[in-house]
Image (cartoon, rainbow, N blue to C red):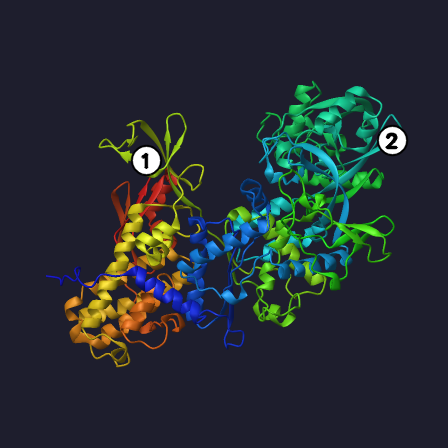
Amino acid sequence: MLLDISKKTPYNFSSVEKKWQNFWLKNNSFRTNPDAAGRKYYVLEMFMYPSGKVHIGHVRNYIIGDIIARYKRACGFSVLHPVGWDAFGLPAENAALKQNGHPKDWTYKNIEIMKKQLLSLGFSYDWEREFATCDEKYYGFQQKIFLAFYKKGLVYRKEAEVNWDPVDNCVLANEQVIDGCGWRSGAPVIKRKLAQWFLGITSFAEELLSEIDNLDGWPEKVKTMQRNWIGKSEGCSINFQTNCGKEITIFTTRPETIFGATFLAISPDHPLALELASRNEKIKEFVEKFKKGSVAREVFDKQEKLGIDTGLVVNHPFLDKKLPIYMANFVLMNYGTGAIFATPAHDERDYDFAKKYKLPVIQVIASPENNNDLPYLHDGILINSDFLNGLRVAEAKEVIIDKLCTMKKGRREVFYRLLDWGISRQRYWGCPIPVVHCDKCSIVPLEEKDLPVTLPYDVIFSEAGNPLDRHKSWKHVKCPICGRNALRETDTLDTFFDSSWYFLRFCVNDSSNDNLLEEKDISQWMRVDQYIGGVEHAILHLLYARFFSKALNECGFGNVREPFENLFTQGMVCNSTYRKENGDWLFPEEVQKKANGEYEMIATGEKVIVGHFEKMSKSKKNVVDPDTIVKNYGTDALRLFVVSDTPPERDFPWSDDGLEGCWRFINRVWRLFIYMKSCGICAPEAGLPIPALASDLEKLYKDFHRTIKNVTDSMEDRSMNKVVAYLRDSVNSVYLFLEKIKANKALFSHISRDLIKLMAPTIPHICEELWSILGFAGLVSDSPWPDYQKEYLEVVTINLPVQINGKLRGTISVNLDDSDDVIFQKAMQIPSVQKIISENLLKKKIFVRGKIINFVV
């Protein structure tokens, strides 16, 4: 009969967790030591916006980072694990309008609230390096960066078409346009030309693209998204002569389809289109209509294809025929040349347009499989194409480009989908742009001695538009060159500018240092060894951060051109949703489950529709408050739960039962170690040699060394869910030997010491307390990671039966350590298995480790 210790000393998590959180903070336990010997390790979770409340999505992200930081510190690395706040942005101004307050007050109050939440979660941050992007010191440094970019020619100002909200009187980013309307006002967005500041990211397009291949520590999905966003297109430009004496240059990636061209299409923003609009009322109406709506490329792709015949034609470069010129709303002026030749038989947009306006469709690529469905978009053999007939697409492309170059009617070209980055925002709560506008001297960048340009506090938010534009005195200054009256730039910087270099500022070892960046500190800490954040930042933030590193390097700041060595994108936290049949969302506490498995409203008995595991959202009322979880279950239970069961890169389904299970495990750990303490398990015993052991205890000790190896390997692989599984198994194994603990103090003192170390990165509070209770020196947070002895890692070989559709087809000999892929590969090498699978459709592979393999065909 097993010994029952379930009624032993209860665990007071609230007292223990507060004790150690206060200790860590008071003693600055996780302060970065730049002088420490050993290898460096820089772990960073993506900047948090101070919205006022830490949500579970934040919690999972930051717990993963904290586990890595604690583990690496235990492995002897000098760890940099900082925290800060991405604090500028539109929500603060919205809150000021709504609450009749001030964005600065709102932001710093939220930072104070959220910092308390982070402290309650036991994160091992170096709080001495904390800053917010709205700190005057930080954005003063940022203004220095702007000026450095300006001097290098990487910042410029030009007129550009933008999304304009006529109600809020401001520019909207493409992401802020929802179904053609402003995301806040709901007003239809119009296109408007404004003078805007831009960063020349396109000058780095090729390097940004080519270096993706060297980002070995990044998820392939993210690398693909960046490649697609940069969008390198190789093709050629072709010059067409019009019947009005003008020349139109088009860019195409499909020059081999030129013999299938049946019309040209130009953007309504093309210079020729604007010229025609000045003298043709119908064309003018079309151009004006085009100006309504967003400039976002995604909106263009989805909208109905519309056009108008300009009445002009061009000569085909190889055939004796004329092609009409249409103005089309799907042609963008900011990609290529703003003009295309259209081959409807081999392009979906061209095909839709041609059918709508009854234009010819000429097939010039034949399918090898005789698939004549149009538009045909794949490889094939050229037909109806004169000297290209019979060639494959790739060969025909080279031939036609060479021909056009020889005829001087075209040339090879490379274009990128990536556009220069518009950084102007007509908002108050952002970093001021350090230039003034003078009627005589034009744009005048400020000197560094005049920085920082700080935001005035006395602004009015009761009206739409930019408060800085309306300020009575702030914008009125003297020109630094001529001394005449001048105006400050009232646009502020896009907040992505703020978050594109913060990881470099964290490297500065002396936070009081007034230098922008310290070369020796950058060299010491960069690159970031592990960056952690959501995949939704795959394009904008991560691409901008890569650009900044290269641009700063060009300006003499830092010696790093790629900022992040390894990138980990955690999955979202999902939860069930509950709705009435009319669509109204309900809180979980308003719902109960009936005996038949259906759900109903507690108050009215109305039927409830359940949606399983949707992304947490306030609007859907399925958000879980981490403060409530910490209060009821403790931080360690929450930390354990969000990394258990589900691999951290996958979406995580929230489960109250799962949380309860983690709480029970925490208590089970507590009872086990308190019982071991009562049996004499302590630090001095852990220093004694382990005597000869009985076979069952010897197996326990060997299995524990395998656990150390498995946990270590899983930590390195970021497989936190596996770490939790191994720790559970190890605790359960020790429970089987409760009656033998007193008689084997040295053995169990060794195991207890190293088991606490293994658990400490994930559940640090209880481990710190147990470490202290058992009398071990110092903090477990400062203790080295346990080593395993290779001689104890006995490889177990077993014979595994292999079935197909439940019928035995053979056996294979495998090591228990073999991976699933290796075992399946061995199983499929059995001749009878190989034959059956080759003759049938394999539907499913089932593997119960250590027991059986079954193929379903």
Q: Position of residue 51 (x, y in %)?
A: 51, 48
Residue shown at the point (31%, 68%) measured from the top left: 769
Q: Quadrant of the C terminus?
A: top left
Give the camera-side residue of 84 and 363.
84
Residue shown at the point (74%, 52%) measured from the top left: 155
Give the camera-side residue of 727 and 100.
100
Q: Is residue 444 visible?
A: yes
Q: Quadrant of the N terminus?
A: bottom left
Q: Is residue 816 visible?
A: no
Callout 2: SS: loop
Q: Amino acid at mark 1?
A: Glu
Callout 1: SS: helix
Relative to 79, is 579 above or below? Answer: above
- For label 2, the crowd category at 10 Å Cα-Cα, with few meaning under 14, some 14 to 19 and many 20 or more, is few
Q: Position of residue 324 (x, y in %)?
A: 78, 23
Q: Position of residue 181 (x, y in %)?
A: 61, 31
Q: Position of residue 526 (x, y in %)?
A: 58, 65
Relative to 345, is 553 above or below? Answer: below
In the shown orientation, is residue 824 left or right of residue 571? left
- For label 1, the crowd category at 10 Å Cα-Cα, with few meaning under 14, some 14 to 19 and many 20 or more, is few
Relative to 747, is 616 above or below? Answer: above
Please name the residue that numbered disc 2 is placed on: 246
Name which quarter of the figure residue 391 lies in: top right
Please name the residue that numbered disc 1 is placed on: 590
